[in-house]
Image (tube, grey):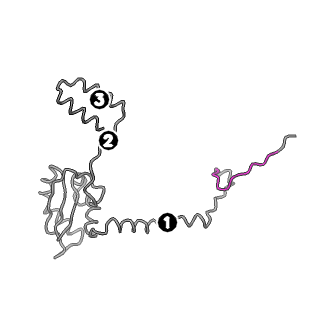
């Protein structure tokens, strides 16, 4: 007769629901100690990141897309709020579009944020900035540098083949320099 061997199951091993006979795994006290209150952690992180920014500026930065619209929010972002003057960084032609929207935007910002009298925004100052992109950092830092997307070696080979077709040596040198950085 064949000998029956009992297989020991490891504690904490993953088993499908059917093998557990419909029972759920008990989460003991040891596991509960590892859980963190996400609200507490998030508030501590945000306090450190936003300690030098006014609550009004943080609100403007976070809701900027709602104030100016999705199209304009892609090329503009608030950079500073000082003495009722909001400074906005923008790219290229967005500056002219924003300039024409200043009276409407001031009215919208003051009404939405509940600013009246001495607290109301009086002016919007426009700065043209090449580095301004989609605002993802909520105005915390505008020193981020644009990055170049890395491409695979086989695509570099295809690009170099296409470069051989260019007749102008100076133009070819410029493109080769650009490709070498990718």
Q: Nearer the viewer, mark 1 or mark 2?
A: 2
Q: How many marks?
A: 3
Nearest the camera: 22 or 153?
Answer: 153
Find residue 51 and report its horizontal and vertical position in percent. Answer: 31, 69
| Residue at mark 3 | 159
Instruction: Report the residue at 21% width, 55% height from top.
Output: 76
Q: Which mark is residue 149?
A: 2
Report how far apart the C-alphas of labels 3 and 2 lie in the structure. 15 Å
Q: Is residue 143 left or right of residue 151?
A: left
Find residue 161 and report its horizontal and vertical position in percent. Answer: 29, 25
Identify the secondary structure beneath mark 2.
Answer: loop
Q: Majority secondary structure of the magenta segment?
A: loop
Q: Is residue 174 magenta?
A: no
Q: Few, some or many C-alpha atoms within 10 Å of disc 3 (few <14, some 14-19, many ≥20)? A: some
Nearest the camera: 61 or 68?
Answer: 61
Identify the secondary structure beneath mark 1.
Answer: loop
Looking at this view, name the residue that lies furthest to the right.
Answer: 1
């Amino acid at each position: 007769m064949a000998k029956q061997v009992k297989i020991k199951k490891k504690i904490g091993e993953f088993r499908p629901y059917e093998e557990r006979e419909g029972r759920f795994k008990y989460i003991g006290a040891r596991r509960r100690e590892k859980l963190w209150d996400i609200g507490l952690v998030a508030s501590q992180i945000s306090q450190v990141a936003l300690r030098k920014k006014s609550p009004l500026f943080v609100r403007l930065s976070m809701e900027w897309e709602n104030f100016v619209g999705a199209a304009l929010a892609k090329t503009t972002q608030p950079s500073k709020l000082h003495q009722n003057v909001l400074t906005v960084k923008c790219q290229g032609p967005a500056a002219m579009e924003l300039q024409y929207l200043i009276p409407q935007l001031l009215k919208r910002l003051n009404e939405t944020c509940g600013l009246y009298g001495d607290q109301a925004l009086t002016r919007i100052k426009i700065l043209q900035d090449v580095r301004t992109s989609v605002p993802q950092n909520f105005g915390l830092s505008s020193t981020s540098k644009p990055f170049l997307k890395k491409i695979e070696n086989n695509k570099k080979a295809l690009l170099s083949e296409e470069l051989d077709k260019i007749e102008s040596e100076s133009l070819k040198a410029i493109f080769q320099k650009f490709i070498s950085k990718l």
